[in-house]
């Protein structure tokens, strides 16, 4: 991504994910291999719903579906497991999104 400083000089933005234990090495590399004089760092937290896996039957076969629930057990999100859908799409020689849609439809019924 490209941005600009106050006086119109261009600058480049780069972002990377890493563990704090290895950040020293990453920063050293960044300073050695770029013209950068400074790097901003900050921590990021991730919040997740509790999950369970439910198997659903579709015309193409059985697919694992992730069910995301809040702390009260209410279902907030569902997502067919990508690898399950990919495997069946490849076996049946059909588009992945057909398998994905069939999994969602089977889950609702």
Image: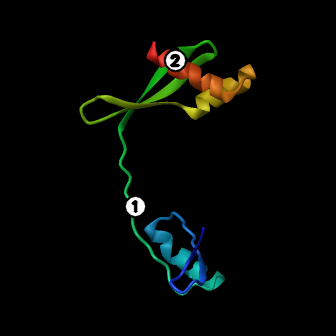
Left or right: 55 as drawn, with respect to 36: left
Residue furthest to the right in view is 93
Q: Where does the C terminus fall, quadrant-wise?
A: top left
Looking at the rendered structure, the secondary structure element under dot 2 is helix
Q: Which residue is mark 1?
A: 44
**What kind of element bears circle 1?**
loop
Which residue is labeled 2 in the image?
Answer: 105
| Above or below 94: residue 16 | below
The Cα–Cα distance between marks 2 and 1, rounded to whole angstroms, is 35 Å
**Tag 2 near tag 1, CB within 8 Å:** no
Give the vertical position of 43 relative to 107 (above or below): below
Residue pictured at 50% horizontal, 77% vertical: 24
Q: Nearer the viewer, residue 7 or 18?
A: 7
x then y, percent, for residue 103: 54, 21
x and y, in percent, of residue 14 in the image: 57, 70
Q: Residues within 10 Å of mark 2 (few under 14, many from 20)?
A: few
């Amino acid at each position: 991504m490209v941005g600009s400083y106050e006086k119109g000089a261009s600058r480049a933005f780069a972002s990377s994910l890493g563990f704090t234990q290895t950040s020293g090495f990453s920063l050293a590399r960044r300073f050695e291999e770029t013209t950068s004089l400074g790097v901003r760092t900050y921590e990021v937290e991730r919040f997740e719903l509790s999950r369970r896996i439910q198997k659903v039957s579709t015309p193409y076969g059985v697919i694992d579906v992730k069910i995301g629930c809040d702390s009260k057990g209410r279902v907030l999100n569902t997502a067919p497991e990508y690898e399950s859908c990919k495997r069946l799409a490849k076996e049946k020689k059909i588009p992945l999104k057909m398998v994905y849609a069939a999994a969602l439809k089977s889950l609702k019924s």
